[in-house]
Amino acid sequence: MATKEEDVKLLGFWASPFSRRVEMALKLKGVSYEYLEQDIFNKSALLLELNPVFKKVPVLVHKGKILAESHLILEYIDQTWKNNPILPQDPYEKAMARFWAKFVDEQVGPVCFKSVVKADKGIDVAIEEAQELITFLEKELSGKDFFGGKTIGFLDMVAGSMIPFCVARAWEGMGIDMIPEEKFPELNRWIKNLNDIEIVRECIPQREKQIEHMMKVAERIKLA
Amino acid sequence: MGDTEEVKLLGVWFSPYAIRPKIALRIKSVDYDYFEEDLFGSKSELLLKSNPVHKKVPVLIHNNKPILESLNIVEYIDETWNASGPSILPSHPHDRAQARFWSAFVDDKWFPALKAAAITKSEEAKEKGMKEVEGGLLQLEEAFVSISKGKPFFGGEAIGFMDICLGSFVGILKAREKLKGEKLLDESKIPFLCKWANEFLSDDTVKNVVPEIDKVVEFLGELEVRAQSAVSKT
């Protein structure tokens, strides 16, 4: 089904894993959209008008309807454009995908970034705690090409945008390997698989630029 | 679905999160075995085995498969027993996203603000926190009016996803009113939500599922004593 570009608008930020994953989903479904880059450090009137509750990106606008919160947007996209499904069909698999996605954003993301940057109990403890969480994902992946099975799905987009192409780069900037191959062979294989997919490559921030950005954010966190 | 289904729910009587799956299972007329976890004691083996990541309730175990996170469980119940009882989530993708959005607001912004304001020792922080909570209720009032379109619930004629999410906290709000004189459900400020709260509590699917307000009052009192003695120990 052809979609007029004006039907779908996405307010995003180039370095935000939350907005990048929405782009992955739209591209996977072949949905044309108008992308509106936002300056999250200087929020536009449009962003504040469309998302007054959370004031964050991403925001998707589809035929005048406004959607916020990346997980919800991904589910909405999956339900509205039925080709190339993102979420599993089976209710149990779906519940697990949602659970792990929440785990990634609410536990892995903050612990692997903020906690490591602040390293209140020392950097070694922070790394250990972070990698303990990543181990859950390593186990979840065992034997599969992607979390979604043979093709990328909801959890791949959430975890992919957040872990290898965001937080791991922050660790790189700090000189630490977040997902060493010896400890996490499955995750490393998964990252290689992700890199082979064109739409993923198109939707990840440029490496050096992002490392630089994450270091700036880290500085802010340390000073706070 | 057949009667060889095995449905177990691990919960804690006080937890608003554990109330949610109970309501959903009632809506779908699903029989289940309930296991009460010891709130202050050690966690059961079943809980630790089914939820090794967070070790929290509620956990739904369906044919030996654990499902975690209260709203996840409600969606799972809705999808699995979709032929039985009314739908819990709206059918239109945008309405679904909206229901999930407001639930995220309640769980990620509104209730944490209430919890923080309740716990803090700083009068200034408490006042600021309560203002945020009241502001949140005004937003929810607006959302309710626009979503319910004159019907008794967010879900329309019957209780739906958003009703379950916010409704699970109504007991706590009413208990806090009795214990602290804190009138968050203020008819002069949020008349529609106040009416909704009473409709919710008297609904058949909710009535014998939520704990009695007086029991909650007693429990909140006990929590406070524990918190204070914990502080004096440090």
Image (tube, helix red, strand yellow):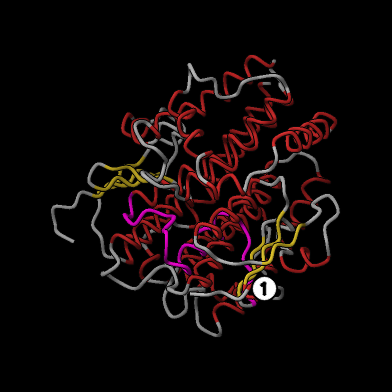
Q: Residue at x 47, y 45 (%)?
A: A155
Q: Residue at x 73, y 22 (%)?
A: A174
Q: Which residue is mark 1?
A: B190
Q: Is residue B207 above or below residue B64?
A: below
Q: Which corner quadrant of the image does residue A173 belong to?
A: top right
Q: Residue at x 62, y 34 (%)?
A: B227
Q: Residue A16 in the image: x percent, y percent?
A: 69, 47
Q: In terms of depth relative to the viewer, which is nearer, B191 or B178?
A: B191
Give the amino acid at mark 1: Ile
Task: For label 1, count other residues whose C-alpha is less than 10 Å away and answer few (under 14), some (14-19) or many (20+).
Answer: some
Q: Residue B132 in the image: x percent, y percent?
A: 74, 57
Q: Is residue B90 above or below residue A106?
A: below
Q: In terms of depth relative to the viewer, which is nearer, B178 or A209?
A: A209
Q: In terms of depth relative to the viewer, which is nearer, B169 or B1?
A: B1
User: Which residue range is magenta in the image?
Assistant: A64-92
Q: Is residue A65 magenta?
A: yes
Q: Is residue B44 above or below residue A126?
A: below
Q: Residue A2 in the image: x percent, y percent?
A: 52, 75
